[in-house]
Amino acid sequence: MKTNQLLWIFVLIFAFSSCKEEVKENANVTTIVKDHKGQAAVELTEGEQPNALQVAASIPDFSTLVVAVKAAEVQDALVNAGPLTVFAPVNTAFDKLPEGTVASLLKPESKKTLAFILTNHVAPANYPLKQLKKEAKKGRKLYMASGKYLTVTYKDGKASVGGTEILKSVKVSNGWIHVIGDVLVPSDK
Amino acid sequence: MKIILKSIFLFVITATFLTSCAPSDKKNNKGAISGNAAEKVYVAPGELDSHYAFISGGFSGQLSVYGLPSGRLFRVIPVFSQDAEKGYGYSEETKPMLNTSHGFVPWGDSHHPDISQTNGSVDGRWVFINENNTPRIARISLETFETEEIIEIPNSAGNHSSSFVTENSEYVVAGTRFSVPFPQRDMPISEMKGNFSGALSFLKIDQETGHMNIDFQIKMPGFSYDLSHPGRGKSHGWFFFSTYNTEEANTLMEVNASQNDKDFIAAINWKKIEEYVANGGGKMQPANYAHNTWNDDTHTATSVMKKQVLVVEPKDVPGAIYFLPTAKSPHGCDVDPTGEYIIGNGKLAASMTVHSFSKMIKAIDDKAFDGDAYGIPILKFDAINYGMLNQPGLGPLHTEFDTRGNAYTTFFISSEVVKWNVEDLKVLDRHPVYYSVGHLMIPGGNSRTPDDKYLVAMNKITKDRYLPTGPEVTQSAQLFDISGEKLDLLLDFPTIGEPHYAAGIAAEKIMPKSKKIYRLDENKHAYGVQSEAETRVVRKGKEVHIYMTMIRSHFSPDNIEGVKVGDKVFFHVTNLEQDYDVPHGISMIGANTSELLVMPGRTATFTWEPKEVGVWPFYCTDFCSALHQEMQGYVRVSPRNSKAPISYTLDGDIPGEEEE
């Protein structure tokens, strides 16, 4: 419960700092001018549930992921109506990659590759943990936004996706975030 | 000869030029538009309008919400008519909103929206609108943009002189257009004169909830009460109602109601009557009228029939009611921002009547009476009249004001808006409108603090102004910039129904508090659920209640069996989303009703009575997500004599039961 409240505070700070609005008046017409940044710039209001990007951006342990999302310019996809399920690698997951990989992926020329890797972490569907268990039981694979399939397993009370264990699950307004400890590098590009 | 020929030639050329010039000049009347008009109304993609305009939907029964200066339509708020798009008047929760003493009425004729006020300025809490045919007043929340309350007005017929509010929203009023037997009884129509009455109703507004309650009805003489406006500033505490048919004619009114040279504006000292009834004055009389309220916790409306109303006879409250003689059949009855000038827009008169509130008070003190009508003193015209605006145009209907002492009046017959100075009684500018203008609106125009920027004229007839669409062309609004000395026509835009009247307000007074979601944990709907785990299907005799949820992108449950032909199936559907702008819809093949459109956190209900065995689908009707097309389910219908028990699943499991 406490973490939840903390999360809320983060989210609100994020929302307010990203909010830009001014009333522009010239001789002719007064209109309310908004800073256009795509759907990712739409503010969160009190009482509303934050979306996948807003939650990720509010948690320090996802800072590498968020930097990567912005570098690949896929942030608008994470705030979309979805529904979507994000398998979100924590910062240490990126550290497990061969040295120099992250720095190289963040280069502008790697944008396409990075986007491909990131979309391999997003399923365009609504999979709460309960549903993932069911997928494992029924042997159904997850179709990812990268176009690849990931296998779900459920053993000893723990669900894993693509061979990495789900550490924690968070409900977000447009689906679910499942926290994982590894980057799900697609089998090929 | 040559010279003559030459001059003839020149003459012909000149004549041709002149005649061909005239129509093109007329065409350019659209071009009375100054060069930068487009710039003034252009709201670039992603930018927002500066004002809301709430424009009456007229005989659509609804209220439309537009942005100014763009003239873009944002929403049609269902008020007095069913709206299949939003399930209003179709869902079990909203049906009671349309209940009346005549039973369920699916349609209404909405007229005059007016925004609530605090200290004489529009405050953006609520907008009120009256219904003419089955006399009612509705209150719409400007947080949810939904109709929250509708109250019927007894002893009335044609609630036209409504729904204007006082400067602190103490009261919203209703005035009957038709005088009728009060209470209703069986009597010859020809004996109308002296036997019919006209009810003026004062509804008190609860400042916390906005709830309306008829505090008292004044049983006035049997004239027709057309429009009204509150006093403000120095005249706060008074209300002014225009009358016509003081002749009390009951047939061929277009002739018989126009015999008198002057009709009246009725001046009502409501503070005095409020005090009188607070001290036990007036008489409770039997009545029967519906009071329908929406509850935002249970997401459900309730209709209560009220059985009595407090009636006040004018003769019992001396000093509270006077008649102000006003030129021929006044329509609008408008009070300027200072509260000093009361303007009668005599629609059949050659001149407009401007009365002075200070002179009226003095005339009352001096007892400057010119007889009485049914015991109500008629004030001497010369003692109250500030002056006349002579020959300003033909068929004046309605006047609003700016903060610079100017009035703007619509003229129906001469199709124009005229700007004039109230104190000087001088016309300053005039501009044609296209065509036959009814009302006009300046944001805050019925308040002490009008906004001097825009004026919207609302036209009844448009003829050649839009692409033809069969025998009827869209009705329209026309936007003017009034910030300069001249009326500057900026834009034509179409309206819904007949745009009877409108109210406007600066966007920042509404925007910040506009509702985004309904909190699921505050949902107290009798059939609402908090999660998929609570979803279920329950049989109660022939009734089957489905407690269903919606979330991107499935229903729970989505496979239901055990329903039988002849059952009445209730779909109680909760939208589990807590995300702004993500409603879900649902509809069922064979349901004799509309879809539901359920806002995030809300629950709504529709019914379905299956008539044939089979497997029948339902689906989400509002494009909600990438998997919207997959958001669907089935109900199996078995014969009446089937012994199949109710069963329901989602992905093969009963929702809420942990699978192992």
Image (cartoon, coloured by chain):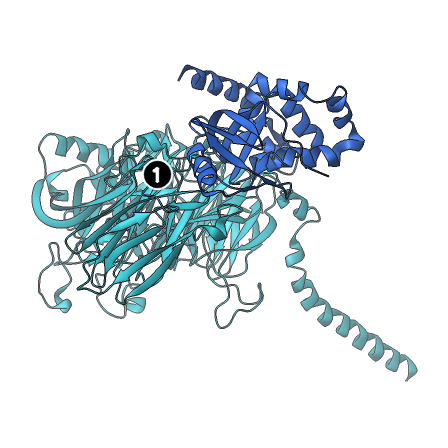
Chain colours: A blue, B cyan
Work out whether residue B400 can be spotted.
Answer: yes
In the displayed structure, does residue B180 sit left or right of residue B561? left
In terms of image quadrants, where is residue B337?
A: top left
Q: Position of residue B287 (x, y in %)?
A: 11, 49
Between B14 and B230, which is closer to the camera in this rendering? Answer: B230
Q: Amino acid at mark 1?
A: Glu
| Quadrant holding the N terminus of chain B | bottom right
Q: Residue B236: x, y in percent? A: 31, 32
Q: Is residue B651 above or below residue B9?
A: above
Q: Nearer the viewer, residue B93 or A7?
A: A7
Most distant residue in the bottom direction: B1
Looking at the image, residue A168 lies above or below residue B596: above
The residue at the point 92 percent across, 82 percent down is B2
Q: Residue furthest right?
A: B2
Does residue B391 appear in the picture of this structure? Answer: no
Disc 1 chain ID: B
In the picture, measured across the screen, residue A77 lies left or right of residue B323, that is right
The image shows residue B23 at horizontal and vertical percentages of 67, 68
State how many labels appear: 1
- Please identify the quadrant where the C terminus of chain B is shown: top left
Left or right, residue A121 beside residue A137: right
Of all residues shown, which one is farthest toward the front? Answer: A156
Disc 1 secondary structure class = helix
Q: Which residue is mark 1?
A: B532
Q: Report which quarter residue B124 is drawn in.
A: top left
Q: Quadrant of residue B306?
A: top left
Q: Residue at x 56, y 51 (%)?
A: B430
Q: Nearer the viewer, residue B248 or B550?
A: B550
